[in-house]
Image: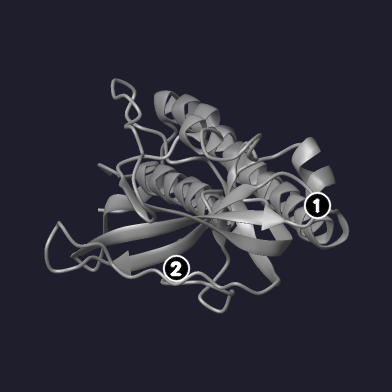
Amino acid sequence: MARRWHIDWRLMVFTGFLLPLLLGLGAWQLNRAGEKQILLQAWQQQSVDTPWAELVAGDLRPGRPVALTGFYGEQTWLLDNRTRDGVPGYEVLTLFLPIDGPPVVVNRGWVQGARTRDQLPMIEVPKDLLTLEGWLAEYPEPPVLGNPESSVGPWPRRVQALPMTVVANVVTSPAPMIVMLADVQQPGAYRADRVPDVMGPQTHYGYAVQWFALAGVLTILTVVASYRRSET
């Protein structure tokens, strides 16, 4: 039997409503990718040109790149229950004292735990004047129903979370966000392999491709469904 074009108005209404929506979502994601690229470029430029003290006084957002010059402090917290490749360990959080601007906690990356819980890994702290590059992140807060533990004793100190209030008990007026080291090449870095908690342009491009692909599939299915077998 031959096939002929047959218009199904219900199908056309459905496609006519959904197809522009899918195309619009794809175009919106492309727009967001362009905006995010411009924002990241502006952040990168500001991290080089803007002193830390001015940067902290401005608009702080997770994922924003920063550059700091100063000294590591003696205070180090070991953030417990952090694993890499199934191996238990800690994230090393050390206070950093910039030459200009408020002190800030620096996440230096992950280190493997000792064989027993009563032992803590040996943590080395560079003593020289250093310049660090990284990106801003939120403090590792305790769960909503949890209470910040009392962090006392010699350094380093094991903690389950590190809210800003705990840091404020050690140093006056710490920065409202912490800094994650950019990579393992940074001074004092351990396994600094976490990525910024921010959606980059590539993610938006990926979403755009998905929306456009769905629009293409819908178009093809509509065309195929509109051809029916002729009875004559």
- SS for tag 1? loop
Task: Please give the residue where the numbered disc 1 appears in the rendered image.
Answer: 100
- Label 2 crowding class (10 Å Cα cut-off): few <14, some 14-19, many 20+? some
Question: Is residue 38 in sight in this rendering?
Answer: yes
Residue 191, horizontal then vertical, whole percent: 41, 71
Tell me how far mark 1 sits from mark 2, CA to CA.
Answer: 27 Å
Residue at the limit of the structure toward the bottom, as seen here: 185
Question: Is residue 58 in sight in this rendering?
Answer: no
Q: Residue at x 67, y 55 (%)?
A: 97
Q: Nearer the viewer, residue 149 or 176?
A: 149
Task: Please give the residue where the numbered disc 2 appears in the rendered image.
Answer: 193
Q: Nearer the viewer, residue 22 or 132?
A: 132
Image height check: is 16 above or below 54? above
User: In the rendered image, which quarter is residue 132 located in?
Assistant: bottom right
Q: Earlier in the sequence, mark 1 or mark 2?
A: 1
Residue 139, horizontal then vertical, whole percent: 49, 40
Q: Give the quadrant of the C terminus.
A: top left
Residue at the limit of the structure toward the right, as seen here: 49
The three-letter amino acid code for the residue at tag 2 is Asp
| Nearer mark to the viewer, of 1 and 2 | 1
Residue 43, horizontal then vertical, whole percent: 76, 53
Q: How is the image coloured?
A: one colour
- SS for tag 2? loop
Residue 63, horizontal then vertical, whole percent: 61, 50
Relative horizontal placement of residue 228, taking residue 18 as reference (left or right): left
The three-letter amino acid code for the residue at tag 1 is Asp
